[in-house]
Amino acid sequence: MKTKAAVVYETGKPIEIEELELDGPKAGEVLIRYTYAGLCHSDVHISHGDMEARLPMVLGHEGAGIIEEVGEGVTRVAPGDHVVCSFIPNCGVCRWCATGQQAICDMGATILEGYLPGDRWPLSGPKGKYGSMCMLGTFSQYNTIHQNSVVKVDDDLPLDKAVLVGCGVPTGWGSAVNAADVQPGETVIVSGIGGIGINAVQGARYAGAKNLIAIDPLQNKREKAMELGATHAVATAEEAGDLARAMTNGNGADKTIVTAGLVVEEIVTGAFNATGKGGTVVLTGLNRLDINNVQLPGSIMTLFKKTVKGALFGDCNPTVDIPKILGLYQSGDLKLDELITRTYTLEQVNEGYDDLLNGKNIRGVMVHEH
């Protein structure tokens, strides 16, 4: 069959809309009709070359839709099921899945190559084989993906909201609840209030942070943070550190979560300095793989017993945590509707990313037209 998709051919160039050929599902695979896709910053990292991926690649790694067809041996879903996609697949049997660390499942090794297990390339076009971002390629009307990348959700959940729980929401939420292990009464800083950071704010609030300081240079982002649970919102790490020390008899934040769109050395250093004795800094945001953006005084880390750690997917286990987080949405404990600033069509994908980069959006959502 044919499908229309948003493709990166060359870094630094606009995303192009292309009609591609799509193979149907083979063993272990499913054909999905995407209904919605989230515009997440990681796709910009691919198109800008911050993260090296095999090109051409169909972008999009936040997706929700309906299963149209399943291949041989598929047990997780059936035709007609409503699903949210997980940007890291989870096989369930590798060392990492078996120890409750699905976020680093071995199947995730090829997400920047974009092919399916068995060297399968379901998408093809004028430039030969096309990869799918995170083995999903949600900026395509249809795609053939692996069953390990989908999680069935309740039919009555609005997929235009549930789509955000494939990447941005659990990554932010889990960075606070799982990776930072925020405890009731703690003082927490979230550095960078975009599609990830706003959910770190929601997670830290739900986990019981007493003082919750959001950092963002943009006024609209600070206002959204206050709306969704922050107690304070400031423009710089210095202000956040001063506030945290004033609230803690001079110590500083218990936990600082770094969720900036592009994490530079200055941001990491600011987070480290704002964090007090015995505190933890969680690095969730990204930069180029070859940049050493962590340059910290090791003796201070030792003497003040600080921890600096990385977190992928918010240390979530998608098969459990995607339904759990959606349950919190259904009970009113987690906001999703309020995160969506604007919707776009597939043809408006470049406009959507311009809006993201210009700081207009907390989260944009692409609505697929079929």
Image (cartoon, grey):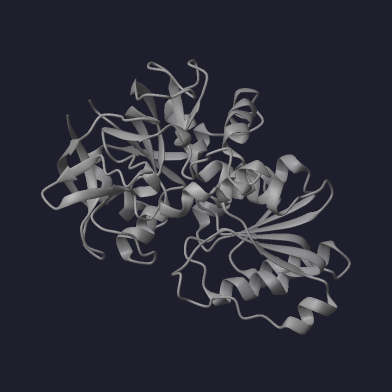
User: Which quarter of the image is occupied by the C terminus?
Assistant: top left
Q: Nearer the viewer, residue 49 or 232?
A: 49
Q: Residue at x 26, y 64 (%)?
A: 11
Residue 97's place in the image compared with 305, above or below, is above
Q: Residue at x 38, y 55 (%)?
A: 112
Mark count: 0
The quadrant in which residue 310 appears is: bottom right
Q: Would residue 335 be found to the left or right of residue 11 on screen? A: right
Position in image of residue 279 (x %, y %): 79, 64
Position in image of residue 91 (x %, y %): 53, 39
Residue 342's place in the image compared with 191, above or below, is above
User: Which quarter of the image is occupied by the N terminus?
Assistant: top left
Position in image of residue 347 (x %, y %): 21, 41
Q: Residue at x 37, y 41 (%)?
A: 136
One can see residue 163 in this view:
yes
One can see residue 200 in this view:
no
